[in-house]
Amino acid sequence: REHPPPDSSGGPTSGGAFARATLAAKCALRGAALSLSPARKRLDRFILVTDPGPDPDDVKALLIAAVLHKQCHIQLAGVICNGGCQPDMRAALARCLLDHVGAEDVPVGV
């Protein structure tokens, strides 16, 4: 297959070559997005066992899982809250965080 002639400027990063490369990348990404659409791929299911509270590590993990769930990268099948003497308060916090990011479909238990 013959390569197209160089752009008038002759450089590989000139406007024409850059536009063709950008278009090729967009088409490749669009094709990848279509082949990996949520309806076509099987999502890994997770149940997160956590103790959200004063330490931010569990809250961060819960938020990351919720966002990945909303973006259809994983299926967050549920959240189980434990730890300390306040599992009900921790579950209420988890419920609030999930609702805040729009993951109302994820059940929370103690």
Image: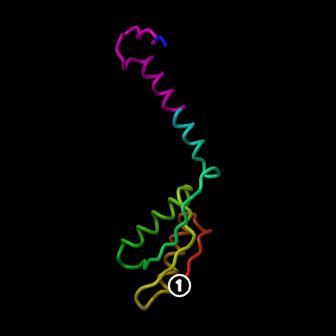
The picture places residue 4, in percent across and down from the top left corner, at: 46, 11
Estimate the x, y position of residue 1 in percent, counting from the top left: 49, 13
Q: Nearer the viewer, residue 36 or 88?
A: 36
| Residue underneath mark 1 | 110
Q: Residue furthest front?
A: 1
Residue sticking out furthest to the right: 39
Left-right relation of 71 to 55: right
Q: Is residue 67 above or below residue 32?
A: below
Q: Is residue 7 left or right of residue 77?
A: left
Decide whether residue 20 is among the magenta residues: yes
Q: Residue 30 occupies which quadrant of the picture?
A: top right
Under circle 1, the secondary element is loop
Which residue: 53% across, 56% down? 73
Q: Which residue is at 42% across, 68% downward?
A: 61
Of 46 and 11, the residue lying toward us: 46
- The residue that appears at 59% across and 74% down in the rendered structure is 107
Residue 85: % across, % down: 42, 91
Q: Amino acid at mark 1?
A: Val
The residue segment tinted magenta is: 3-27
Q: Is residue 107 magenta?
A: no
In this rendering, the answer to whether 71 lies above or below 92 is: above
Residue 57 on image: x %, y %: 36, 71
Q: Residue at x 35, y 76 (%)?
A: 55
Q: Residues within 10 Å of mark 1 (few under 14, many from 20)?
A: some
